[in-house]
Amino acid sequence: MFEVFENNESEVRSYCRKFPTVFSEAKNALLIDREGKEYIDFFAGAGAMNFGHNNPYIKQAILEYLSKDRIIHALDMYTEAKEAFLNTLNKCILNPRGLDYKVMCCGSTGANAVEAALKLSRKVKNRSNIFAFSGAFHGMSIGALSMTGDRFSRNGAGVALSNVTFMPYFNAFDDENISLDYLENVLKDDHSGIDKPAAVFLETVQAEGGINVAPIDWLKRLRKICDENDILMVVDDIQVGVGRTGNFFSFERANIVPDMVVLSKSISGFGLPMSFLLMKPEYDIFKPAEHNGTFRGNQLAFVGSIAGMEYYNDNDLSAIVRENEKIIKEHLAKNVLPLNEHLKIRGIGMIWGIDFSGIDASYALKISHRCFERGIVIELAGRNDAVLKILPPLTIEKDKLVRGLNVIAEEIAHAV
Ligand SMILES: Cc1ncc(COP(=O)(O)O)c(C=O)c1O
C-alpha cells in the first residue's frame, strides 16, 4: 500500500508513520485520503494551515496570479507581488499595531529565518552567546538546533552545538519567578561563568515543548531584563503567530515589542514555503547579500500572504479564535479533566494540550493512533511525547471542532 514510500523514501520520514494513509484532497479542516476517507485536521500542517486547506479567498488570488503568467521566481529582485506584500503587511498588520519593523525575506523554511535572526543578533551585539529556554524548539538546522532542547533532535546534529546557554523556562519550577530570578542572577554575577548573550530567543507559547503558555508578567519581566542588560529579545512566532493565540502576534497579549520576530508557516496563507525576519530598523545591519539564498521571496507565497492578511482582518479571525478557544477550553474542562485527576490541560487561543505525563506518557501515542483510526489527525508534543496537541485550522467549522473534541474525549475515557 505504501510501497514506493517505504522502498524509495528515506527512513527519516516522520509524520507519515503516525498518519499512515495516502492523502489526496483537503478542504478547510478536512483531509481526504485516496480511499475517500475523511479526517478532521487537528494538526493544521504543524501550524502552517491556520487559514484552512484551500481557503477559497486565498486560492482565488493565487489562481488569478498564476493564470496571467505573472513572475513566479525572482530571487529577491523587486516584483509587484513583493511590493504589494510589503504594503499589505504595513497596512493590515504592522501599522495598526504601531509596530515599526523592517522585513528580511529569508529562505523557504522557518529554520532559515531562525538562522538569520541568530546571525544578525550576534552581529548587532558583537557577542557569540545566546540564551534559549528549556523545552524550546526552533528548528533542525545547526544554529536552530543549538537552541532546541530535545536530546533526540540535538543528537542528530553530529557536531557540538555551541554558543547557546539554556535557561529554565517559566514552567521549570513551581514558582514561575524562579526561572527569571536565576537568569537575572546569571547576568549580574560576574563569576557566573556564563557569557552575556547577544539575544534571548523564546516562544511565548512553546508548542513542540508541550503547549506551555508563558504568563504575561513573566514575558514583561523578561522584556525588562533584556532592556536593562542590553540584550535583544527575539520571539519565534513561527508556530504560534498569525492568529493562533487570539492575536496576530503571540506577544501582543503581553503588550511587549520584541526586537526581532521570526515568522513562517501560516504567514504564506496557503501552506507555501516562506519565512521572514522582522527587525527593529536600527538592527537592520546585514550587508547586502550577507544572508543570501535562492528561494527568498516565493512570489506565490507573497500573493497568498496578502490574501491571508486581508482574510484575517476582513473576517475578524481573532474574534473567531476567541470563540473557539472558549469551546475548546470548556469542552476539555467538562469532558476530559474529570476522566482522571492526573490529567492536565494547557493552552490559549486555538493551541491546546492534554498532558498525560501524570499518568503515563505512552497513553498520548495510543490515543492519537485511535483518533486517527476514527478520522482525526492529531499530533503529540512535549517531553516523552506525553501531550496530545490540539491545533486545528483557525477556520475549522464548529461542528467539526466539536466532533473532533468528542472523539478525543471518548478515546481518553476508553484508555485511562
Ligand atoms: C517554533 C518553531 N520554530 C521553528 C520551527 C522550524 O520551522 P521549519 O520546520 O519550517 O524549519 C518550527 C517548526 O515546527 C517551530 O514550531
Image (cartoon, helix red, strand yellow):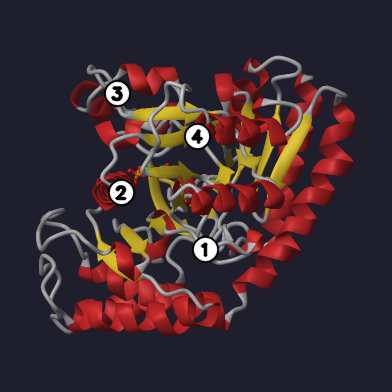
Q: Is residue 141 visible?
A: no
* Residue position for label 1: 257
Task: Please say if 187 is above or below 284.
Answer: above
The C terminus sits in image quarter? top right
The label nearer to you, 1 versus 3, is 1
Q: Earlier in the sequence, mark 2 or mark 3?
A: 2
The label nearer to you, 2 versus 3, is 2
Q: Quadrant of ligand 1?
A: top left
Q: Earlier in the sequence, mark 1 or mark 2?
A: 2
Measure the C-alpha gap from mark 1 to mark 3. Answer: 29 Å
* Residue position for label 4: 187
Task: Please say if 214 is above or below 365.
Answer: below
In the rendering, which numbered label is found on residue 25? none
- SS class of the residue under badge 3? loop
Contact check, label 2 and label 3, Cβ < 8 Å? no
* Residue position for label 2: 125
Q: Residue furthest front?
A: 190
Residue found at x 86% / y 24%: 340
Please state which amino acid type lies under the numbered disc 4: Leu
Left or right, 109 with reference to 30: left
Query: x, y percentage for residue 74?
Result: 10, 69
Q: Earlier in the sequence, mark 1 or mark 3?
A: 3
* Residue position for label 3: 161
Q: Is residue 221 visible?
A: yes
Query: x, y percentage for residue 291?
Result: 16, 53
Please state which amino acid type lies under the numbered disc 2: Lys
